[in-house]
Amino acid sequence: MVIHKKRKHSPTPQVNVMLTVKSFYDVSSFAYQDLFPGNDHVWGPLKTLKAYMDSWSYLKIDTDLIKSGEPLPETLVFLNGSFEKGGRFTIEFGDATKGKLKVYDNGRLLENAAVIMAGAVLCGSRISLGSGVLVESGAFIKSPTIIGDRTEIRQGAYLRGYCLAGKRCVLGHVTEIKHSILLDDAKAGHFAYLGDSILGNNVNLGAGTKLANLRFIPGNVQIKTEEGMIDTGLRKLGALLGDHVQTGCNSVTNPGTMLGMESMVMPNMTVPSGFHKRNSIIR
């Protein structure tokens, strides 16, 4: 006689409320908020970033003015969906994040004009620029990349693709970014590395901050919490920094570091992987 046992169904795992998107980020005014379901794990947006950006509607690159992979021979102005040679404009190269980048046409201020300086390199056709953006000489941008309004991409920045930045961000000098998201007013100004990471609103990285994203030991990155380990399902995962987090100069985060809102990392510190609650001070 064969006895058929009733199969038990495993309950759907619950998302720890401390590790949800809404516990780390306020996305109510973020232009790309549909990438951030509030009750999803905080690393969830990185899982869907590629599909999200692959479906984005990008601007049409003028191949007569911009040769993919080649430094621009002259400065370009981008306005109302089209590029024009910058030589006929008067440009004041002020701080783009504060709205001080000014472009004039015969004395008339052109609201919302973006500027790509001579010597910058755009590689690929899937690049989106917001209003008032400044791309400085020597920046290298691979597609796909989405840049929000009044963001500044400084000299020597290296954007390796699948980079999404909101408004008034700084992608700084000799800063390398790949497969990462910066919410509004996030700044990685100097000598930083961001791999598979998310910077919340008003996050500021001190010079030399490195957000490591790959473990030495094979396998997915797991998050250490008080309730135990959580498998993220991601082989690569850098840091998830909540709104208003600050890191000191030359600090390093291990793969799978999660810093709650308003946390601080002192200079020269190495931050252990795992979840660090709101207002943590790593020293």
Image (tube, grey):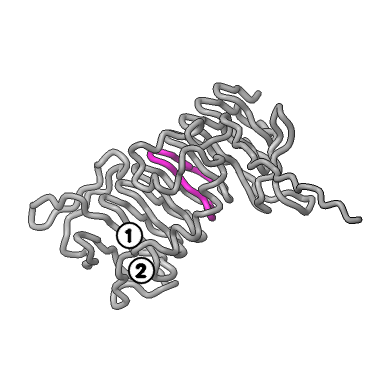
Residue 72 percent coordinates (x, y): 35, 68
What secondary structure is found at the residue carrying circle 1?
Answer: loop
Q: Residue furthest right?
A: 1
Residue appearing at x 37%, y 75% in the figure: 67
How busy is the neighbourhood of tag 2: few (under 14 within 10 Å), some, or many (20 plus)? many
Q: Is residue 99 left or right of residue 143?
A: left
Tell me the crowding category of disc 1: few under 14, some 14 to 19, or many 20 or more residues within 10 angstroms, Cα based: many
Disc 2 + disc 1, Cβ < 8 Å: yes
State the residue in front, 248 or 168. Answer: 168
Can residue 249 be seen in this snapshot?
Answer: yes
- Residue on which the image places disc 1: 117
Query: Circle 2 sits in a helix, a strand or a loop, which is it?
Result: loop
Label 2 or label 1, whichever comes before in sequence order: 2
Residue 72: image tag: 2
Is residue 51 magenta-colored?
A: no
Picture residue at 34% right of the left edge, 49% below the top: 148
Q: Give the spatial CA distance, label 2 vs label 1.
A: 8 Å
Q: Magenta includes 190?
A: yes
Residue 141 higher or lower than 263, as above or below: below
Q: Amino acid at mark 2?
A: Leu
Residue 184 in the figure: left or right of residue 76: right
User: Which residue is more in the foreground, 230 or 135?
Assistant: 230
Q: Quadrant of the C terminus?
A: top right
Q: Which segment is the magenta one?
A: 176-192
- Determine if residue 159 is in view: no
What amino acid type is highlighted by mark number 1? Answer: Met
Residue at point 38%, 63% (across, down): 127
**Residue 122: percent from the left, percent from the top?**
40, 66
Q: Position of residue 209 (x, y in %)?
A: 58, 40
